[in-house]
Image (cartoon, coloured by chain):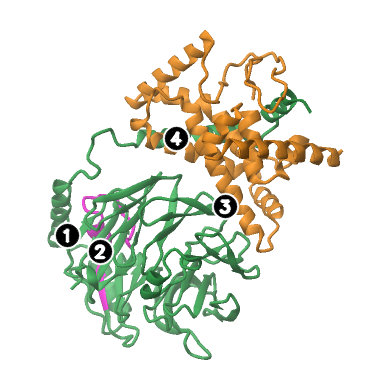
């Protein structure tokens, strides 16, 4: 997935704030955190999105497709990074969009679409991952299940996942994965994560710290 | 690692099947959008004209088209010597209301033979007391009343095999894609139960209503058996997701069914019936007659007998059997009820357990059998016309999927 960069993001936990500059030729991605549309281009984006939502509410399939193409990559990726299961991530992202369609007529166009959608995605992904870890308590090996599922569905593509960050992420609990995904993929602030997950902000901060510590440890071990 | 590195690697990490997933997703979302109801439209547009036309077409089919005599003759000649002549279905032989799946959608058939098309749905399943029907369409699971009024709907990709918790109806389990999900009987709190299951309908463990009321909300109230892709069967608490037990691997069942007294769980697969205890222990395996492949199976309401239909290939073509396995006996052996050429495809017990309805696909007929009096067979012919009024091409033989509940007006 190619995303435009660089762009400033709000800092949290004393981290560095700049994104690495990368050339981008395909403009498909958008800021998904809650709207802090300060720049003219972002304001323009927001206006365009409002128009799409309005048109989709009126029955425009083209507007719906714009919304879909704009937000699917992030929703799907966020789900995948929390659940680490390709089929489940696809289901979760689809279900979030279906929920969006169900609520489209009631949707408040003053609200940004992405955060609303991703809130559904991440919460469903956490539920799914929790469900799997509950099943683990009965003695089944969840990773074996994942491998079996993916090998049983070869059309879903290679189950081999080589990126060490993602492999390390898999070792975290679903709740910790979710805050990492919200913070570093979707670029939410800790306050926004607290709102999305209905958690106290202090809990979000501590989960982020623990998650990053564990992520570092897992990657050290992997090396 | 710098935050920027972490961001970049999360953004750029390869994802399996990313492009294909996006396009599959778009097809589903687009279809759901195309099928959504415009704002302000009635959830259930009344269809008096359609119903009237349907009923008129049935009358015409019955009165003006006595063709199909060959079928009638066939039924009369070969089913049983004392089989009554095949007539269109005009009444059910036992109390209750029958749910039927047809090319045009599910129908509700009252005991007096009156029938109502529920709508353009694929599958249908009675709620425990027949107050609602869970129906599926391409992208929705819905609960509708027997008059067709939609109670709620849930958008899901290709939902199938909805099953209500017996007695309470507090939960519905259903399949979507390769997963099993559970939703409340009121359409809320939908959640994943098992991300990877076999294409087998789930089977809720019955709980007596009085006990269910006392234990409402407690763990163990809503417990369901599901089949895994490797043939294992799991008993899962739908609310806590605790897996109570899991059987060893085996043939993937086509049907799972609990006896009413919860003493036995039956797994029907191919040519055998495996019987498990309530604790998941394999009690016995009952082999079907040589060469027979099961097409359907159902517990009698008493829970003491399990009926099976199946087909076998012979030199003269397909031959079918309907049989009953008296599972309450210490050494249960299949007891044949009826055998004939063609395919017996579906079966349903009457609520009083006295009648067994078997769909006979090749003869376009339904057979009402009495397991206690095997010679007494009532036959309804030309059933596909009756449940596909106006259809000019060969409609599928309608499938009886549930015979429910005397309390809902089945007289």
Chain containing mark 1:
B
Give the mark nearest the N terminus, 2 or 4: 4
Q: Which residue is mark 2?
A: B382
Q: Residue B168 at what x, y percent from top left?
A: 36, 66
In three-dimensional space, the C-alpha distance between marks 1 and 3, rounded to whole angstroms, equals 50 Å
Q: Which residues are magenta?
A: B378-399
Mark 1–mark 2 contact, CB under 8 Å? Answer: yes
Q: Which mark is residue B402?
A: none
Front tag of 2 and 4 = 4
Instruction: Answer yes or no: is residue A163 visible.
Output: no
Q: Which residue is mark 1?
A: B65
Task: Judge from the rendering whether residue B377 lies leftward or rightward of residue A52; answer left or right.
Answer: left
In three-dimensional space, the C-alpha distance between marks 4 and 1, rounded to whole angstroms, equals 44 Å
Give the mark nearest the N terminus, 4 or 1: 4
In three-dimensional space, the C-alpha distance between marks 2 and 3, rounded to whole angstroms, equals 42 Å
The quarter of the picture where residue A77 lies is top right
């Amino acid at each position: 997935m190619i995303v435009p960069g660089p762009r400033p993001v709000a800092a949290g936990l004393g981290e560095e704030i700049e994104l690495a500059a990368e050339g981008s030729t395909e403009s498909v991605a958008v800021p998904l955190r809650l709207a802090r549309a300060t720049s003219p281009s972002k304001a323009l984006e927001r206006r365009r999105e409002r128009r799409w939502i309005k048109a989709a509410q009126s029955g425009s399939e083209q507007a719906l497709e714009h919304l879909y193409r704009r937000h699917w990559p992030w929703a799907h990726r966020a789900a995948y990074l929390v659940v680490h299961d390709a089929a489940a991530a696809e289901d979760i992202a689809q279900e979030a969009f279906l929920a969006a369609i169900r609520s489209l007529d009631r949707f408040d166009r003053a609200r940004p679409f992405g955060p609303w959608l991703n809130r559904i995605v991440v919460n469903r992904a956490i539920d799914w991952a929790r469900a799997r870890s509950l099943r683990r308590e009965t003695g089944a090996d969840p990773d074996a299940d994942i491998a079996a599922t993916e090998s049983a569905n070869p059309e879903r593509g290679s189950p081999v996942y080589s990126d060490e960050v993602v492999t390390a992420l898999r070792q975290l609990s679903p709740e910790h994965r979710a805050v990492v995904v919200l913070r570093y993929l979707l670029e939410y602030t800790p306050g926004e994560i607290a709102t999305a997950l209905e958690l106290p902000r202090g809990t979000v901060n501590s989960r982020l710290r623990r998650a990053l510590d564990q992520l570092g440890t897992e990657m050290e071990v992997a090396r | 690692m710098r935050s920027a590195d972490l961001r970049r690697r999360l953004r750029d990490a390869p994802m399996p099947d990313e492009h294909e997933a996006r396009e599959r997703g778009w097809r589903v979302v687009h279809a759901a959008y195309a099928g959504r109801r415009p704002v302000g439209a009635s959830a259930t547009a009344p269809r008096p004209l359609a119903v009237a036309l349907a009923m008129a077409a049935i009358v015409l089919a019955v009165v003006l088209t006595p063709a199909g005599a060959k079928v009638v003759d066939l039924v009369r000649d070969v089913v049983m010597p004392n089989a009554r002549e095949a007539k269109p279905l005009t009444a059910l032989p036992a109390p209750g209301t029958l749910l039927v799946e047809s090319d045009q959608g599910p129908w509700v058939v009252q005991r007096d033979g009156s029938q109502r098309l529920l709508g353009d749905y694929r599958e249908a399943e009675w709620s425990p007391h027949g107050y609602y029907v869970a129906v599926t369409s391409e992208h929705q699971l819905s609960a509708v009343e027997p008059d067709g009024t939609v109670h709620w709907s849930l958008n899901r990709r290709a939902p199938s095999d909805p099953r209500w918790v017996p007695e309470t109806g507090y939960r519905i389990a259903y399949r979507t894609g390769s997963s099993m999900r559970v939703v409340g009987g009121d359409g809320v709190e939908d959640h994943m139960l098992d991300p990877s299951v076999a294409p087998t309908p789930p089977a809720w463990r019955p709980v007596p209503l009085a006990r269910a009321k006392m234990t409402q909300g407690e763990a163990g109230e809503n417990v369901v058996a599901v089949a895994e892709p490797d043939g294992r069967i799991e008993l899962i608490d739908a609310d806590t997701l605790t897996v109570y037990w899991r059987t060893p691997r085996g043939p993937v069942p086509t049907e799972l069914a609990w006896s009413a007294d919860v003493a036995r769980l039956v797994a029907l697969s191919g040519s055998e019936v495996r019987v498990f205890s309530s604790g998941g222990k394999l009690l016995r395996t009952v082999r079907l007659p040589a060469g027979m492949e099961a097409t359907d199976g159902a517990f009698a309401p008493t829970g003491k007998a399990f009926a099976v239909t199946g087909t076998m290939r012979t030199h003269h073509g397909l031959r079918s059997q309907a049989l009953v396995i008296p599972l309450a006996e210490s050494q249960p052996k299949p007891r044949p009820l009826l055998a004939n050429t063609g395919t017996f495809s579906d079966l349903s017990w009457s609520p009083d357990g006295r009648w067994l309805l078997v769909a006979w696909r090749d003869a376009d007929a339904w057979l009402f059998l009495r397991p206690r009096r095997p010679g007494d067979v009532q036959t309804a012919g030309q059933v596909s016309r009756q449940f596909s009024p106006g259809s000019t091409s060969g409609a599928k033989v309608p499938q009886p999927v549930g015979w429910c509940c005397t309390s809902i007006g089945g007289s």
